[in-house]
Amino acid sequence: MAGLRKAKEYDWKDSNMALFGSDTEKKVKKESAESEPAWKNAGSKVGIQIWRIVKFKVTHWPKEDYGKFYNGDSYIILNTYKEDEENEKLLHDVHFWIGKGSSQDEYGTAAYKTVELDTFLDDVPVQHREVQGYESSLFKSYFPTIEILDGGAETGFRHVKPEEYVPRLLHFHGDRKHVDVKEVGRSMGNIDSSDVYILDLGLKLIQWNGSKCNKDEKFQASIYLRKIEQERNGKPKKESVEEGHDCEEFESHLKEEEGETQSYDAVDKTKELYRLSDESGKLEYRLEKSGDEISKADLDSKDVFILDTKSEVFVWIGNETSESEKSNAMSYAHSYLQGTDHPLLSVTCLSEGKKSKIFDLAIAA
């Protein structure tokens, strides 16, 4: 099939994605949604709301931790907005975010509860699946920085005695639009002169500025440093050093080993539009069009389409498609991604007529 390639192997790929968008998830009833305590006031006003999945339950994530995610957890993020100041109608984007170390129970619950939240909000939201390290541009736009830490929320500093705190190395990388903060292994191989790092020793914080880092990375790291200091009641001592100046303490906590393997991108960056067809008796993806000239005029209300921009994937569901097709959008995306060289992209599923800023940017009018 044109444009599709054999997927690379991932330890967690198959078990993660296959759960999402199943018929069972889509049959969640309005009554069940309304009985979920966590959804009280959900989407009632403009702004961001975040929940974490804890032992099959939806729990509110503290507002002071918005933008911070643990790779051992799964989260639900709701963005409520108005199209313009003159229109009072509230619109929504609902995302579920999957950490690489999240358990099957947690990410399965996150997917299920995302569908439930969509039902609670009368099917108005556009649904998104976010995977750690491959977050969509829309998701990133919600936060000045996104901080990804190892473990689950229970492993954070607030839950650990200072003398038992395990040192961590935080990597700051980005530009004026957005800076990502990611915990990386404490090895010399992970240090890059073009970025900024913070060595968090619990009660000692060392900011290391690479010789080629930009001012935005430096600025966000300094803000982060002050935030940690405040969270720990001013107890930590702070230090900032520039590359090239001796900092024995910083280097003494780093191991002499290779850095982490970098993620990969699709080899071919050409946009592709696929039409879903079952004419042969089984579901198939037929390449409809490729290139930058793909437009909304290429979509047909009677079918389901997948738009692959090579950085994000969209599933568009026509209003005249069957209920079965409408209920399995995320499954379609999963099935499609299994046959490509980029299985971990963010996924947006939307029905014809729903508002989606990132879809409008990805496809011509």
Image (cartoon, rainbow, N blue to C red):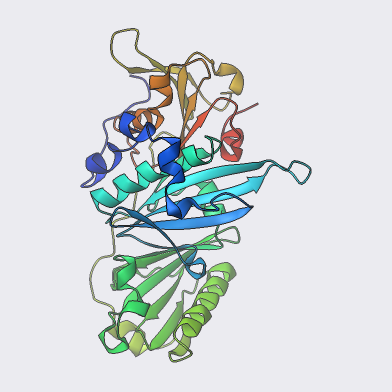
Of the pair 141 and 248, the residue shown nearer to us: 141
Q: In this image, 9 relative to 57: left or right? A: left
- 192 is higher (above) or lower (below) than 107: below
- 135 is higher (above) or lower (below) than 322: below
- 49 is higher (above) or lower (below) than 355: below
Of the pair 357 and 105, the residue shown nearer to us: 105
Tell me where residue 12 appears, x and y as whole percent: 23, 47
Identity of the residue drawn at 49% across and 45% down? 94
Tell me where residue 172 appears, x and y as whole percent: 46, 67
Of the pair 31 and 303, the residue shown nearer to us: 31
- Indicate the quadrant containing the N terminus: top left, top right, bottom left or bottom right: top left
Tell me where residue 178 appears, x and y as whole percent: 55, 59
What residue occupies the far right of the structure in this picture? 86
Identity of the residue drawn at 52% across and 25% down? 291
Of the pair 245 and 354, the residue shown nearer to us: 354
For the question of whether residue 311 can be seen, the reply is no
Identity of the residue drawn at 54% across and 44% down? 93
Q: In which quarter of the image is residue 339?
A: top left
Tell me where residue 129 appears, x and y as whole percent: 41, 43
**How many numbered circles are shown?**
0
- Indicate the quadrant containing the C terminus: top left, top right, bottom left or bottom right: top right
For the question of whether residue 62 can be seen, the reply is yes
Q: In this image, 120 relative to 11: left or right? A: right
